[in-house]
Amino acid sequence: MPTPQPSGRPVRIDAWVWAVRMFKTRSAAATAVRAGHVKINGEAVKPAQQVVPGDRVRVWRNHHEHDLEVLATVAKRVGAPVARTCYTDHAPPPPPKEFMPSVPVRPRGAGRPTKKERRDMEKFRGGFR
């Protein structure tokens, strides 16, 4: 079975974001569009809105915003290498993990925390002491 080739024809936005692997299922893509997490050229749209090459699509997914420029349209789901050729992501990359606040982790099997460790944990969490 041949793989679908990228084209310049108009395609529904829910089908396109699903086809280029922004969402796992088409229904999840349609739900995200209805919820306003997908915008075309800055406008909130319905799932049946058509997208064509040259449009800017903003997708809010996994606490990160993707700013996609449509280069080609596909109506059927394609492989990841082909999907990456259908858009250009203009969003800045997510911050590195080292700059994200981390939660202290106790080693597994270390037993119950001591009184001092418990107080330190409560203080870290903003406890009452």
Image: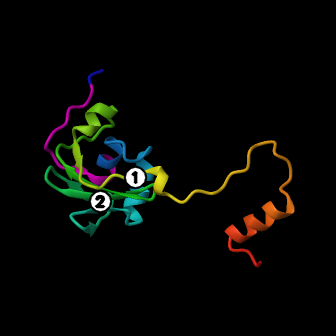
Q: Quadrant of the N terminus?
A: top left
At which x and y percent is residue 65?
35, 59
- Residue at 68%, 69% (x, y): give it: 125
Considering the numbered disc 1 on the image, is that residue within a helix, a strand or a loop?
Answer: helix
Question: Could you tell whether 73 is left or right of 99 in the image?
Answer: left
Mark 2 is on which residue type?
Arg
Colour theme: rainbow
- Label 1 vs label 2, nearer the camera: 2
Looking at this view, name the residue that lies furthest to the bottom.
128
Q: Residues within 10 Å of mark 1 (few under 14, many from 20)?
A: many
Looking at this view, name the residue that lies furthest to the front.
116
Considering the numbered disc 2 on the image, is that residue within a helix, a strand or a loop?
Answer: strand
Q: Residues within 10 Å of mark 2 (few under 14, many from 20)?
A: many
Q: Quadrant of the C terminus?
A: bottom right
The residue stretch that appears in magenta: 3-15
State which quadrant residue 55 falls in: bottom left
Residue 5 included in the magenta stretch of the image: yes
Q: CA distance from mark 1 to mark 2?
A: 13 Å
Residue toward you, 29 or 112? 112
At which x and y percent is residue 11?
23, 48
Q: Which residue is mark 1?
A: 29
- Residue 58 got which mark? 2
Q: Earlier in the sequence, mark 1 or mark 2?
A: 1
Residue 54 versus residue 108 in the image, above or below: below
